[in-house]
Image: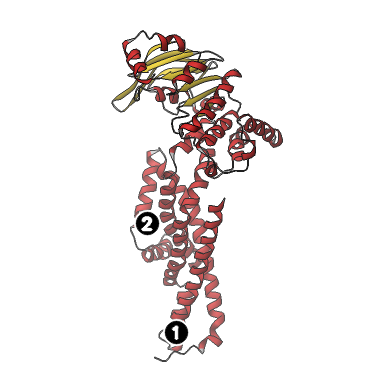
Amino acid sequence: MNLNFSFLSEHWPAFLSAAWTTLQLSAVGVILGTIVGVLFALMRISTITPLKFLASAYIEIIRGTPMVVQILIIHYGLTTVGINLPAFMSGVVALTINSSAYMAEVFRAGIQAIDKGQVEAARSLGMTRTMTMRHVVLPQAFRNMLPAIGNEFIIIIKDSSLVSFIGIGELMYTARTLQGSLYLPIEPLLVIAVIYFVMTFTLSNLLQALERKLKKS
Amino acid sequence: MINVEGLHKSFGSNEVLKGITTTIRQGEVVAVIGPSGSGKSTFLRCLNRLEEPTSGKIFFENREVTGSQSELNKIRQRMGMVFQHFNLFPHMSVMENLLLAPTLLKKGDKTSGREFALGLLRSVGLEDKQDAYPASLSGGQKQRIAIARALAMQPSVMLFDEPTSALDPEMVGEVLDVMKKLARDGMTMIIVTHEMGFAREVGDRLIFMDGGVIVEEGNPREVMANPQHPRTQDFLSKVL
């Protein structure tokens, strides 16, 4: 097999800006997904039945349908009801919704794994439910959940490739475009595979370092 | 100081407390004993509503514990509780454990809170552990810190739920010593315990519970020396 990477000398800026787009999409998706995920996790463990039901339904539906379908529904479906989001925004919304459903389950499991005695100790001191959650439960839960959260971050970086379906110029889209225009079957894909791996591997190492740091204290 | 009127508690169809009525006076040290399953821990946990009573009323310093949630949070600030399993916050240092609730709830200035907390650590003999994390402490040390943490809120009553039951035997003494000192200083204390010697020595009143009711109560020495009720006699003959 003859691999020809000479196109990189001319096209590397395209990959660079695509990688930046992928990073932006993933970062925003992860951050918003985490925030929305915490809210849904709290709803799911609340004692208010309608909130609980709403959260469960949301989580099950989002986890139970393919992300590509969600992306296409959000982008084209919203257009039919008169909401015209730019492709990048649609991508962010789709990634946020998707990651929030998985994050909600990670947070729920993490919160429920904290010993009941911790909550009782905090409440017996007169702390409110919110104070207890914020200062006692969530910090401990977060530490336990770090590996699962890291997993989710990595999945989002990889899944962001699916937004190429709606024409966002991220890595996957750029590779497909160059594949066609340069008649190169696999070289652009190999390039983005390497870029994706560098991103996820760096993230994975950062998270491991954070885990070690938290363990020490 | 604490009035309990007709307290009932059921878990599903299992009735654990079948009508408790009692009064705890200021400065009184009350030891609650009884066989396992007698409802003594549930009784204690109802006093600050960690367990929700099924029926009955509880008053503390003329405020109703069984009232609203916001009232309850204020009442809890005045009722310290010490647990069998310590329940220290493992992600915080000893000092942070002591200061968390006072900082969040009283908003007093931090330096005086820290001074006060240091004084508490000194009184439980663990002044040098203020920067340690709970994982590095022994069971006895953890329980002494837990007592100091409860005292940091300056409560007017302390509830102890089998505070020495999870400890290795050689560490029981150091925790009981701290509790004795607290009793001498006039703290109102309600202690669910299996330590009969401690109950006799420190207690002003002994409550014997069985089957969800108070079977017998009185001066610890008298009850232990001369129990009136057959169930008290039976229980004491097994543990003394």
Instruction: Looking at the image, tell me whether mark 1 or mark 2 is earlier in sequence order.
Output: 2
| Amino acid type assigned to the residue bearing label 1 in the image | Glu
Q: Which disc number belongs to residue A62?
A: 2
Q: Which disc number belongs to residue A187?
A: 1
Query: Residue at (51%, 16%) from the top-left corner?
Result: B201
Position of the C terminus of chain B, as image quadrant, is: top left
| Amino acid type assigned to the residue bearing label 2 in the image | Ile
Q: Chain of mark 2?
A: A
Against B239, is A208 above or below? below
Q: Secondary structure at mark 1?
A: helix
Residue B5 seen by the camera: no
Give the residue furthest to the bottom. Answer: A2
Query: Residue at (50%, 46%) from the top-left corner?
Result: A140
Q: Identify the image quadrant of residue A14.
A: bottom right
Q: Secondary structure at mark 2?
A: helix
**How has the structure been colored for display?**
secondary structure
Rendering coords of residue A127 (x, y %): 54, 34
Rendering coords of residue B122 (x, y %): 65, 32
Q: Which disc number belongs to residue A177?
A: none
The span from disc 1 to disc 2 (Cα, nearest Å) is: 34 Å
Against B147, is B219 above or below? above
Residue A14 seen by the camera: yes
Rendering coords of residue B191 (x, y %): 48, 22
User: Do tag 1 and tag 2 residues touch (Cβ < 8 Å)?
Assistant: no
